[in-house]
Amino acid sequence: MTAQAGQQARAAREDEIEVRCREGMPLGAYAGGGAAHYLFLEPGGPLALSFPLEPGAALHSFANALPLFAWDEREMSDERGVRFADLPDPRPFRAHGGAMPPAILASGTGLMHIVVGPVHAGIIEPGRFTFSSGGETVIFLDAQLGYGHRGCERALEGEPALAAARRVARICGGCSAARSHAYALALERLAGAVLAPEVELGRLVVCELERIYNHLADLAAAASAAGWAPGFANGMALKERAMRLCAQAAGHRLLFDAIVPGGLGAGVLRAPGELRAALGALADDVERYAGRLFGNGSVVSRWLHTGAVAHETARVFGAVGPAQRGSRGERDVRTFAPYGAYRRLAVHVASHAGGDVFARCSVKRDELSESFRLVEEALQTLDDADPASANAVVELAPASGTALAAVEGPRGAETLAVHLDGSGRIERLHAISASYRNWPVVVRAMEDNIVPDFPLVNKSFNLCYACVDR
C-alpha cells in the first residue's frame, strides 16, 4: 500500500469511528484475538470495529482525534504489547516495579505544582493527582491511577466461563450487579438462551437497588464536600438502609452473585412483598432527604458553577452515565439500547444542562426517584406471580465465539467483551467500567476551578479506582 493510500484508508477509518461516536455511544477499545477492537453501542446493541494486528506493524492512534480512546490505547500498548505509531501520550498506563511514570506538568511563569496522593485519607484506593496551578486556579490536572493493578483479566484466561462468573462479580463491589448482568448477557447470547420475564424483572430490581445505594452515597459525599456534615451523616444512614435491603433481597450487601449466567442467584427475591414495603418507606425518607439537601442554599451555592463540563467536552472524552447526562446528554443504555426488563418498563431519562456539580447531583436525585418507581412496578408484578419462578436458572452451554454486552450501571455504561474457545473457557475477557470512562472527564472538570474545589468536583463524580485497577 502506498503512503497516500494508507493515509486515505486511515482517514476513512477515522471518519467512520467519528460518525459512530456521534450517532451512538463509544464504549472503549481493547486488544484480543489478534486485533484491536473499538466498541460502540447502537440501538441494536454493542458492536466492534476491528483492526488486525500484523507482526511488526504499528497501528494509527485514534486518540489524536478522539481523546476518549487515550486510556484504552495506552492500556493496549502497556498491557498487550500493541504498537502505535503516534500515541499522543506514550507513557506507561500503570505503575511498573512500583514506579509511576512522571506526571505531565504545565509550564509557565508563576505556575506551581501540587501533588495529591497516591496515598489518601480514609479508605479510598491509591491514585496520584498532580495539579499545575497559577495561585489557586488549576491550569492542568494529571490523574494517574493504576497503582493497585490486580491483573483480573489475565487471571481469568483459561477459566471455565460459567464458573468465572463469581470472580467477575468481584472485580468491583460498587458495580457488581451491573457487571454481573453484562457478563450474564454476553454468555446468554453465545448460548442463544431466552430467559423468563420474571427473571428479567428480578434482574432489574437488583440493578436498580445497586443504583439506589450508590446514588445515596454520592449525594452524601457531595454534601460533605460542600461542608454540610448533617447532609453527609443522613445520606450515609440512608445508604446503609439501602444496603441492608440489598442483603434482604439478595443475601449480600454488595449484591455479589445476585445475577448469574442463566438467571438469578439462589434465594434472590424470595419475598418481594416484604421488600416492596420496606423500599416504600425508604423512598419516602429519601424524598425528604433530597428536599432538605437541595433546599440548603449554602450547599447549592457551592455546587452551582463548580466543576462545569461543557457538552462537547463530555462528548469527546466519552463521558457516560450521570456525568454525561449532567452535561446536556441524554444517552442511557436502558433506553438507547434496551435489554432485559427495560424493554418492557419504560425509563424516564434524567438530564440537566448545567454540566456542574449541581447538575450531576440533580441527575442522581431524579434517578433515585425513577429507580424507586421501577423497583415498585417490578416487585408488584413479581408479587402477583409465583416468586420461585424468578429463581429458575437456565442451563447454559455457551458456544465458542465473541460476545459484547453493555448495561447501565450507577455511573454509566458497564461493558464486557468475552472471547470463548470451543470448550467454553475464556480466551480473553475485557471489562470497561463507567469509572474508567469518566476519570478523564474529572480532569477536564477541574480546569479553571480552584484547588480547594477538587474534593467537591471529585465527589460529584464519585468514581471507582478498583474498576481501573482490575
Image: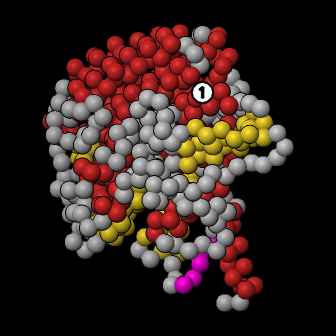
**Residue 85, can we see it?**
yes
Q: Does 303 appear above or below 77?
A: above
- Range of magenta residues: 56-60
Residue found at the very far bottom of the displayed protein: 1
Work out whether residue 213 or residue 207 is closer to the camera in this orientation and state it: 213
Q: Residue at x 61, y 54 (%)?
A: 102
Q: Residue at x 17, y 30 (%)?
A: 270
Q: Main secondary structure of the magenta part?
A: loop
Residue 268 lies left or right of residue 331; in this view the side is: left
Q: Residue at x 38, y 40 (%)?
A: 175
Quadrant of the rendered image containing residue 313:
top right
According to the picture, the residue beneath numbered tag 1 turns out to be 456
Residue 268 lies left or right of residue 447; in this view the side is: left
Is 59 included in the stretch rendered in magenta?
A: yes
Q: Where the N terminus falls, by quadrant?
A: bottom right
From the top left corner, tell me how far across and down residue 213 is, in percent: 39, 27
Residue 464 lies left or right of residue 136; in this view the side is: left
Quadrant of the rendered image containing residue 399:
bottom left
From the top left corner, tell me how far across and down residue 419 is, in percent: 35, 67
Q: Does 274 appear above or below 316?
A: above
Using a 10 Å C-alpha cutoff, classify the residue at mark 1 as few (fewer than 14 neighbours), some (14 to 19) or many (20 or more). Answer: many
Q: Residue at x 20, y 56 (%)?
A: 163
Work out whether residue 156 or residue 258 is closer to the camera in this orientation and state it: 156
Is 72 included in the stretch rendered in magenta?
A: no
From the top left corner, tell me how far across and down residue 71 is, in percent: 56, 56
Work out whether residue 317 or residue 398 is closer to the camera in this orientation and state it: 317
Element at label 1: helix
